[in-house]
Image (cartoon, grey):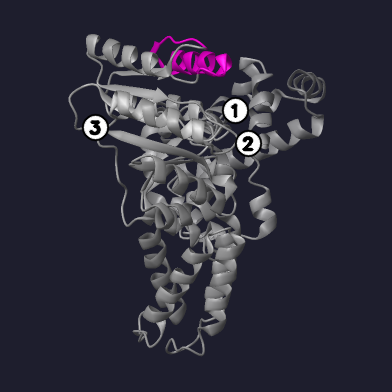
Amino acid sequence: MFDNLSSRLNDTIRGIRGKARLTEENIKDALREVRMALLEADVALPVVKQFVTEVKERAVGEDVVQSISPGQAFIKIVNDELVRVMGDHNESLNLAAQPPAVILMAGLQGAGKTTTVGKLARFLKEKEGKSVMVVSCDIYRPAAIHQLQTVAEQVDVDFYPSKAGQPVTEIARNALHEAKKQFKDVLIVDTAGRLHIDADMMDEIQIIHETVRPIETLFVVDSMTGQDAANTAKAFNDALPLTGVILTKADGDARGGAALSVRSITGKPIKFMGMGEKLDALEPFFPDRVASRILGMGDVVSLVEEAQEKVDHDKAARLAKKIKKGKGFDLEDLRDQLEQMQNMGGLSSLMDKLPGAANLPEHVKQQADDGQFRRMVAIINSMTPKERRFPAIIKGSRKRRIAAGSGTQVQDVNRLLKQHLQMAKAMKKFSKGGMGKMMRMMQGKMPPGMPF
């Protein structure tokens, strides 16, 4: 996410380094680049104009203290403005209502609304400890009702059945009655989408809103539609009292225009963003963390939170104990590490949150291929338990069998064995207290900007 914008802004900041003071003259080019970067990211024009004006007013004449460079002063100003545009702080869901608190989901067809209902239900159940019921008021697509039922089963929340042709007010009213009867904390109401905004759609969703009187009315929008996302959000906001926005498919949006436009145009906060297809891929939207990612400074806080939540700490402790005792790092250990990384969203997601990742050479970024990790796991799964524990026994005929079993080539098996050998040697140095020496060796080899 934000790859193009990050790259352009980093290039811009490099261009004003070495100056003793920020003046209107020496930031003119930088501001032009910022403007172009935002427009290329598909940020709405009024937002771009306001953004550049605010940055210019704060930057011109800004004294640069001895400890920082003009580039750092400028990046601080841009960072603060990005945070302001996106909403200053995370705004969580307001569920302070007599149970069940009703959440109404609105949006166009294809935005990922039904999947987002499942993601939100899972988030509320697992992170907030709420009992949740979901219901579909999409009476035009029977497949949508079935899809929500399937998603509800996957995240283990209650599904209230509805059917095509049933009056939407009847579905909504009956679902609310049932949620009260079962003492549910939250009822999430999915609504019908259209390919475009029309009067019938708005009339229907207004009737549903009046029937269930939701405490939260969330607009679900595909972030890859850029500034169109902000425009459709505004149209829905004019028809409904929206309380927030959920950006979907943010992991596939290299531009980020929607994230930077929605708050300014609608005045409504972005509360969550979907970062993948899996039902756990929903993140609360923190403007300061997103601004940090845009400017290539990473998002260590989210990375740590994700590690605490998704890493198997028992496995990690066992591996640390094993290495400390001087026992070998075998292929089963490697598979565990690869799977844990995949649980955290894969290598590309991790790199997105690492400070300095924006400064990595392009060919290094392209190597962040999660498909390669999956191939590595497939190769290890094709081995016998003995081969995983004693990789040295894997020779010609075994390699051919493993390659055939994993749908890969013998050279892929050779590459994996070589990578494992290098990691095993590194782990051995850890066990002998050579970590400090290794870090010093790595420092000279890492690209500038990496956190070592």
Residue marked by disc 1: 331
Q: Residues within 10 Å of mark 2 (few under 14, many from 20)?
A: some
Residue 368, image x, y percentages: 63, 46
Q: N-terminal of the two: label 1 or label 2?
A: 1
Q: Is residue 180 left or right of residue 286?
A: left
353 is higher (above) or lower (below) than 388:
below
- The residue nearer to you, when weighing 419 against 313, is 313
Q: How many marks?
A: 3
Residue 411, image x, y percentages: 80, 34
> How far, Cα to Cα, is label 1 from label 2?
7 Å
Disc 3 residue type (three-letter): Leu
> How far, Cα to Cα, is label 3 from label 2?
49 Å
* SS for dot 2: helix
Disc 1 residue type (three-letter): Leu
Q: Please tell me which residue is depicted at 47% across the width and 16% down the height of the picture.
A: 154
Residue marked by disc 3: 95
Q: Which residues are magenta?
A: 139-164
- Residue 313 shows in the view: no
- Residue 137 shows in the view: yes
Q: Nearer the viewer, mark 3 or mark 2?
A: 3
Q: Please tell me which residue is depicted at 41% across the width and 58% down the height of the picture.
A: 264
Q: Are marks 1 and 2 in contact (CB under 8 Å)?
A: yes
